[in-house]
Image (cartoon, rainbow, N blue to C red):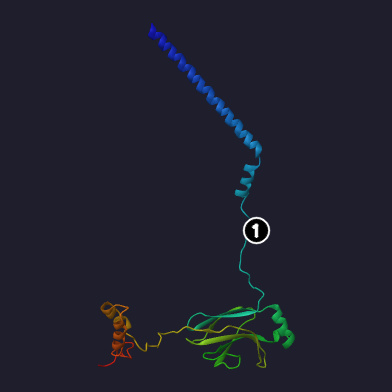
């Protein structure tokens, strides 16, 4: 009988405990929902603002896509010369409307002349515009703003003038470039004049006397007298 009442009491306690947990869970859930609603009321536009910023409304029309291109001109009169390889140069330039107006006011109509690139060989000289070793003229068109120049001359220095030439042969310089030197097209013909055997002497003597010993310097001097001079590249070894 006692066991019956004990089991019955435990069952009632278990039921009460389960009901208590269920009620507490519902209360917490209700509080959480009210808290979320309260936050949403405080910042009603937050979600909409981020959505509009992060999500595009649709694809951009092709004609409205942002375009970033290098400018075609910079409004600066300049002629730049580069050595492309041993045989070719590359030049690019810009002639402003101001420069064209100055030319027209001084020499007459722009259309009565034509554009020319004058390529000077200035190897070994301080070029002053009149003392080039030689030069060639290359006819170009008015639309060109760059040109590849075939010199066929490795290891030479060049300078270029952009100008206008008249039917009577007059050449008027508009712009002058920097000076460049084309690379060599072969191995260097320079040979070492002497090979000094100092490293070998140093390694053999420093262990014998020590670097700080006075005998070290004396031995270096003595052995230097026996070093064969004129030692150079293969084919130039001295005969003994």
Front residue of this view, candidates 166 and 68: 68
Residue at the farthest front position: 214
Residue 93 image offset from top left, x and y in percent: 61, 79
Q: Quadrant of the C terminus?
A: bottom left
Front residue of this view, candidates 17 and 117: 17
- How many numbered badges does the structure rendering display? 1
Q: Which residue is mark 1?
A: 64
Q: Does residue 214 appear to the left or right of 135 in the view shown?
A: left
Q: Is residue 206 visible?
A: yes
Q: Quadrant of the N terminus?
A: top left
Q: Quadrant of residue 219?
A: bottom left
Residue 55 image offset from top left, x and y in percent: 60, 48
Residue 92 versus residue 231 in the image, above or below: above
Q: Residue at x 51, y 23 (%)?
A: 22
Q: Is residue 55 visible?
A: no
Front residue of this view, candidates 183 and 135: 183
Indicate the secondary structure of the residue bearing disc 1: helix
Q: Residue at x 27, y 79 (%)?
A: 209
Q: Residue at x 53, y 26 (%)?
A: 25
Residue 21 image offset from top left, x and y in percent: 50, 23
Residue at the farthest top position: 1
Q: Does residue 30 appear to the left or right of 13 in the view shown?
A: right
Front residue of this view, candidates 206 and 28: 206
Q: Quadrant of residue 111?
A: bottom right
């Amino acid at each position: 009988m006692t066991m019956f009442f004990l089991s019955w009491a435990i069952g009632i306690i278990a039921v009460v405990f389960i009901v208590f947990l269920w009620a507490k869970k519902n209360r917490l859930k209700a509080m959480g929902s009210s808290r979320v609603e309260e936050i949403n009321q405080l910042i009603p536009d937050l979600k909409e603002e981020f959505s509009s910023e992060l999500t595009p409304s649709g694809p951009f029309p092709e004609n409205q896509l942002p375009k970033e291109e290098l400018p075609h001109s910079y409004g600066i009169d300049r002629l730049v010369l580069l050595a492309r390889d041993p045989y070719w140069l590359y030049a690019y330039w810009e002639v402003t409307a101001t420069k064209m107006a100055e030319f027209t006011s001084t020499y007459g109509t722009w259309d009565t002349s034509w554009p020319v690139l004058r390529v000077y060989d200035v190897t070994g000289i301080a070029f002053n515009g009149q003392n080039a070793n030689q030069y060639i003229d290359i006819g170009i068109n008015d639309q060109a703003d760059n040109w590849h120049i075939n010199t066929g001359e490795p290891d030479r220095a060049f300078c270029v003038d952009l100008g206008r030439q008249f039917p009577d042969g007059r050449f008027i310089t508009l712009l002058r470039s920097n000076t460049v030197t084309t690379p060599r097209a072969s191995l260097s013909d320079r040979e070492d004049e002497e090979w000094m055997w100092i490293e070998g002497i140093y390694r053999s003597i420093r262990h014998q006397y020590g670097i700080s010993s006075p005998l070290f310097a004396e031995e270096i001097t003595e052995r230097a007298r026996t070093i064969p001079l004129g030692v150079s590249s293969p084919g130039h070894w001295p005969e003994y």
